[in-house]
Amino acid sequence: MPTRRLSITVEDVEVEVILKAIKHAHIRVSPPHGTVHVSAPLGTTVGEVRSILLSRLGWIRTHQARFAASTTFVAPMMKTGELHYCWGQPYPLLVREVANRARAELRDGQLVLAVPAGSSKDERERLLDRWYRRQLQLAIPSVLAHWEPVVGVQSSQWGVRKMRTLWGSCNIKAARVWFNLDLAKKHPESLDYVVVHELTHLLEPSHGSRFAELVARAMPDWEGRHERMSQSIFDPGIWARR
Ligand SMILES: [Zn+2]
């Protein structure tokens, strides 16, 4: 089968092109480096390949960003110099040994963990988790107060939980809403989005068309927020399907 291979660059994206006896062009982004391959029918011009790629550039970048995030993620050791996130901003960790009680704080652009000598990684992690929980506990009341009248519903109670697969959850009968501890690492727009999502469930339990309409009415830009939240690092995985 006659084939032709070429490499082209579209904006900053390098693409391997193969022309062969197929009917339709298709694009593939491969792990782990997000390499882009295009297969196109023989006779397709470079200009045509370029315009196909330009029209799919957003999709390509989304996939590349996902691979980049998943391949560079290393389990934190809770050591000085590591980057940790709060409200979408990276802060280098500074672990200091102190004689008094352990505490965490943001100071001079650093996330300072003051811990007793010989503290374990788990102890430092728990300290940081408590600090993240505190950040959410400080932020959530005003976020709920803002969005409840917009969505048109009142929650009775809220809480923060460590959750592996959900950003938020709710108990519809009790009008109780729960938020994932990792939301403290995300840009604040993610917390807004999850608050609106869970509050909307108090009106509509399913993810059907009524749910989508209610979310879009309260928060017209929800889609962009959802996409940015899933792309950024510290994504605990699956988006809530409940
Ligand atoms: Zn849901």
Image (cartoon, helix red, strand yellow):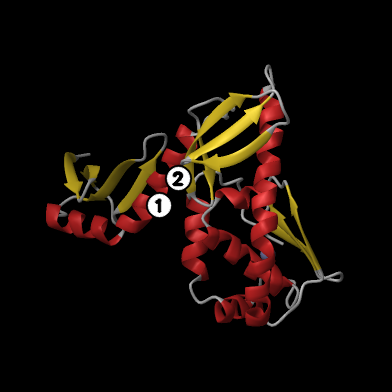
Is 216 placed left or right of 198 in the picture? left
Could you tell me the amino acid type at mark 2? Arg
Q: Quadrant of residue 201?
A: bottom right
Q: Which residue is at a point 54% across and 59% down the rendered structure image?
A: 188
Could you tell me the amino acid type at mark 1? Thr
Is disc 2 in contact with disc 1, using a CB cutoff of under 8 Å?
yes
- Answer few, some or many: residues within 10 Å of disc 1's Cα (few below 14, many 20 plus, some between 14 and 19): some
Task: Tell me the tag on residue 62.
Answer: 1
Q: Is residue 59 visible?
A: yes
Q: Quadrant of the C terminus?
A: bottom right
Q: Is residue 49 above or below residue 196?
A: above
Is 189 placed left or right of 180 in the picture? left
Q: Quadrant of the N terminus?
A: top left
Q: Quadrant of residue 142?
A: bottom right
Task: Tell me the tag on residue 66.
Answer: 2
Q: Is residue 228 above or below residue 73?
A: below
Q: Is residue 165 visible?
A: no
Q: Which residue is at a point 46% across and 65% down the rendered structure image?
A: 224
